[in-house]
Image (spheres, grey):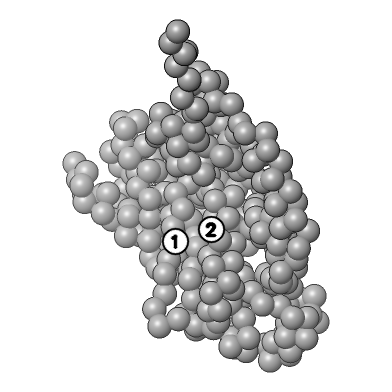
C-alpha cells in the first residue's frame, strides 16, 4: 500500500516570495504587525492562509521568550539633544522621536530628551558633562538655533546621528525628509491640473538649511515645462514666526499672472486670511503639511515614523560597533513623504 505523500511545509520564505517582500517583513506581519502598513499586513496574512502556513508552536514560544528577555534588558541610555525650542512646540518632529524611542526600547535602549532650556542655558561643555555623568552612549541631535551648524560636545564618548541637515561639525550620519522629491511632486501635481504659471514662495533661511533642495527642484521642474517665461521665486528672508508682506506678494502674483502656487500649508492659511480663494483664485500645493494645521490643501505629508526608525537603527549600529564621534565623510538618508489630496 502506497503511503500518502506528505504535504510540504510552508515556510516564511515561501510567503515572502509570493508577496514580493522580505522574510523579515513576513515575520513581523504574522506576529504583531509592528510598524507595517495595514494593507501590507492584511495582504501577507491572507497569502499565508491561502498557502496553508502553520506556525511551529515551539518556535513561537521560544521567540516570544527571547523578545521579552531582550526588551527587559536595558543596554544603554540614549539622549535626544535639542538646542532650540522644546520639541513639543515643533509638532512635525515629535512623531519621529516617538518612533525612534519605541524602536530603541524594543532593542533594549532607553531614550531621554535633553533640551538646552531644561539644562538652564548651560554651555555645551557643561551639557557634555551632564551626558557623561549619566552614562549616555548614543546621541540623536535635533534642531539647532538659527545659524548654528556645529556642536562642541565630547564626541569621543558618544555615538551620534542627526535629525535634519544642519550639522557640519562633527560629521555624522543624518536623516531627513526628502524635500527635493517633495517639491517635484508639488510641481508635477499642479502641472497635471492644467496650471502653467506656477510660482513658489520660499523662506530662504530654511532652504539654506536643507541645502537649497526646494529651490533646485523647482528650477529643474520649471526648466522641463517652459511654455512661458519662468516666474522668479518669491524669497522671504524672514523667520518662521514673521508673516510675509501682503502687498509685495500681490504685486509679484499679478506681475507674473500666476495660476498656481507652491508653498507650505501655513502659506495657504495666510493667503486665505488675505481674502484669496484656494483653490479658486490660485491653485495650491504644499511642500510640507503639518499635523498641527488644518489647511485642507493637497501636498506632502512627511513620513516621520520612518525617519525616526532610521535614526534609531543607525544609532544602534554605531553603538554596537563602537563607532564614536565624527566620521571622515557624512551619509544622508532621505525619506520620501506621501501625497495627500486633503492635507
Q: Which residue is mark 1?
A: 333
Q: Residue at x 71, y 78 (%)?
A: 136
Q: Horizontal placement of 195 versus 319: left or right?
A: left
At x 35% / y 47%, what residue is drawn? 184
Q: Nearer the viewer, residue 279 or 81?
A: 81
Q: Are marks 2 and 1 in contact (CB under 8 Å)?
A: yes
Q: Seen from this angle, which residue lies furthest top? A: 1
Tell me the element at label 2: helix
Q: Secondary structure at mark 1?
A: strand
Q: Is residue 57 above or below residue 168?
A: above
The image quarter containing residue 322 is bottom right
**Which disc, if any, is residue 310?**
2
Q: Label 2 crowding class (10 Å Cα cut-off): few <14, some 14-19, many 20+? A: many
Side (left or right) of 300 relative to 68: left
Looking at the picture, does residue 283 appear above or below residue 123? above
C-alpha span from label 2 to label 1 = 8 Å
Residue in view at x 49 percent, y 33 percent = 11
Spot occupied by residue 294 in the image (x, y as percentages of width and height): 63, 39
Amino acid at each position: 500500500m502506497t503511503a500518502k505523500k506528505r504535504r510540504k511545509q510552508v515556510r516564511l520564505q515561501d510567503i515572502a516570495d509570493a508577496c514580493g517582500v522580505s522574510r523579515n517583513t513576513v515575520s513581523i506581519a504574522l506576529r504583531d504587525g509592528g510598524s507595517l502598513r495595514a494593507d501590507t499586513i492584511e495582504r501577507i496574512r491572507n497569502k499565508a492562509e491561502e498557502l496553508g502556513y502553520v506556525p511551529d508552536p515551539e518556535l513561537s514560544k521560544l521567540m516570544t521568550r527571547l523578545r521579552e528577555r531582550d526588551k527587559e534588558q536595558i543596554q544603554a541610555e540614549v539622549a535626544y539633544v535639542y538646542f532650540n525650542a522644546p520639541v513639543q512646540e515643533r509638532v512635525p518632529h515629535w512623531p519621529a522621536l516617538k518612533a525612534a524611542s519605541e524602536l530603541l526600547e524594543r532593542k533594549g535602549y532607553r531614550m531621554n530628551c535633553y533640551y538646552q532650556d531644561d539644562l538652564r542655558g548651560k554651555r555645551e561643555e557643561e551639557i557634555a558633562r551632564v551626558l557623561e555623568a549619566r552614562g549616555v552612549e548614543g546621541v540623536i541631535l535635533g534642531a539647532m538655533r538659527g545659524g548654528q551648524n556645529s556642536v562642541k560636545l565630547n564626541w569621543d564618548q558618544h555615538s551620534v546621528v542627526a535629525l535634519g541637515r544642519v550639522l557640519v561639525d562633527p560629521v555624522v550620519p543624518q536623516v531627513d525628509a526628502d524635500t527635493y522629491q517633495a517639491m517635484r511632486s508639488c510641481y508635477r501635481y499642479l502641472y497635471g491640473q492644467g496650471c502653467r504659471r506656477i510660482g513658489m514662495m520660499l523662506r530662504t533661511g530654511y532652504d539654506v538649511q536643507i541645502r537649497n533642495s526646494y529651490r533646485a527642484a523647482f528650477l529643474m521642474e520649471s526648466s522641463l515645462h517652459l511654455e512661458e517665461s519662468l516666474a522668479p521665486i518669491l524669497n522671504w528672508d524672514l523667520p518662521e514666526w514673521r508673516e510675509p508682506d501682503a502687498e509685495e506678494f500681490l504685486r509679484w502674483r499679478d506681475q507674473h499672472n500666476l495660476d498656481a502656487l507652491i508653498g507650505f500649508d501655513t502659506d495657504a492659511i495666510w493667503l486665505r486670511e488675505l481674502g484669496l480663494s484656494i483653490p479658486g483664485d490660485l491653485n495650491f500645493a504644499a511642500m510640507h503639511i503639518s499635523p498641527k494645521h488644518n489647511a485642507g490643501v493637497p501636498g506632502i505629508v512627511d513620513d516621520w515614523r520612518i525617519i525616526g526608525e532610521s535614526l534609531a537603527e543607525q544609532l544602534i549600529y554605531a553603538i554596537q560597533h563602537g563607532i564614536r564621534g565624527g566620521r571622515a565623510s557624512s551619509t544622508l538618508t532621505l525619506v520620501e513623504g506621501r501625497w495627500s489630496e486633503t492635507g
